[in-house]
Amino acid sequence: MPGTPGRLTPDRFGFSMPPSDPPFDKPPYYYRGIEMMAFAYETDDDAAAAIVPEGLTIAHSPAIAQLIFTNFHFSTLGAYTEAILGVSCLWEGEPVTYCSNLLVTNEVGLIGGREPYGFPKLFGEVEWVKEHEIISAYAERPKGKRICTGVMRPRDILAPEDVVTPPLVTLKIIPSPEEGAPPEVCELVRTPLEFELIVGSDGRGEGFAGPGNVTFDSPSAIDPWHRMPVRRMVASSWGRYNFVLPYGQVIKRYDVARTAEPVEQADEPVVAAGA
């Protein structure tokens, strides 16, 4: 005989999975007293264009890439660290930052950014180091495989008006479980962010610019952040901020007729054992 029917109806679904016990709630999400270290550098136009989706335009020539390290001491999505690789772009004339790669250390931070917004987050190791007059951060995946490093020396104090935060744009893709079917979701998402520079008791902002540099320490075919090489450093900064992560907005939906072909990796020589 049939058993008891399920009673979890859509009006009782949680905001995320598992729907009966969602790990986080609806936006907005609050971030307080966080640290961010940001680097901007010139890279190759073709390398940037190869990973920027149709609909966006590279904002500069040479293209400007951004490597950002965050240390989220507190947020309503938890405490975690993160590394972000992006490209300065334009959406219908508006400056935006397209986020191509992210590494994060907290599972709620991962799914809270990946599921609603499409931030392409993967688990990785992201560490901060403060030694002598230097602040640095690095990302590894897996642990011990150094993907990137940023190093800077805080020197020139920033004012709150010096902080300009373009909206972030992500390419959100949710594949279909059915063989040969196109993605269930394939869209560009624009998320506005306004970083508020924390002001100290002396009335000055807790942020600094200064000399710094970025290195992509070891090439990885799995996480090829090195494909946007550093040609010239443009800016380096560190600061303490508050911000609110609000709802995003879908700005473009792609008409995907079939499943995208897998990305082919360049063949590499096979080295025989003992060679």
Image (cartoon, rainbow, N blue to C red):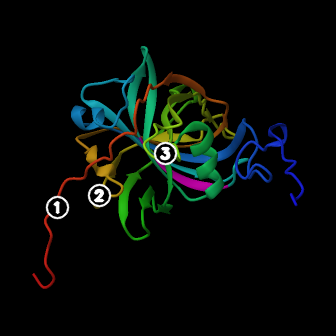
In this rendered view, identify the residue nearer to me: 12 or 51: 12
In this rendered view, identify the residue nearer to me: 106 or 149: 106
Question: Hey, what amino acid is under mark 2?
Answer: Ala
State yes or no: residue 262 in magenta: no
**Location of mark 3 (residue):** 120
Mark 1 and 2 residues: CB-CB less than 8 Å, in contact?
yes
The magenta segment? 79-85
**Is the residue marked by circle 3 packed among few (<14), some (14-19), or many (20+) residues within 10 Å?**
many
Element class at badge 3: loop
Which percent across, then down, holds residue 221?
29, 57
- Above or below for 72 versus 140: above
**Location of mark 2 (residue):** 221
Q: How many marks?
A: 3
Residue drawn at (42%, 50%) of the image: 153
**Location of mark 1 (residue):** 268
Element class at badge 2: loop
Q: Earlier in the sequence, mark 3 or mark 1?
A: 3
- C-alpha span from label 2 to label 3: 17 Å
- C-alpha span from label 1 to label 2: 10 Å
Residue drawn at (75%, 38%) of the image: 26
Element class at badge 1: loop
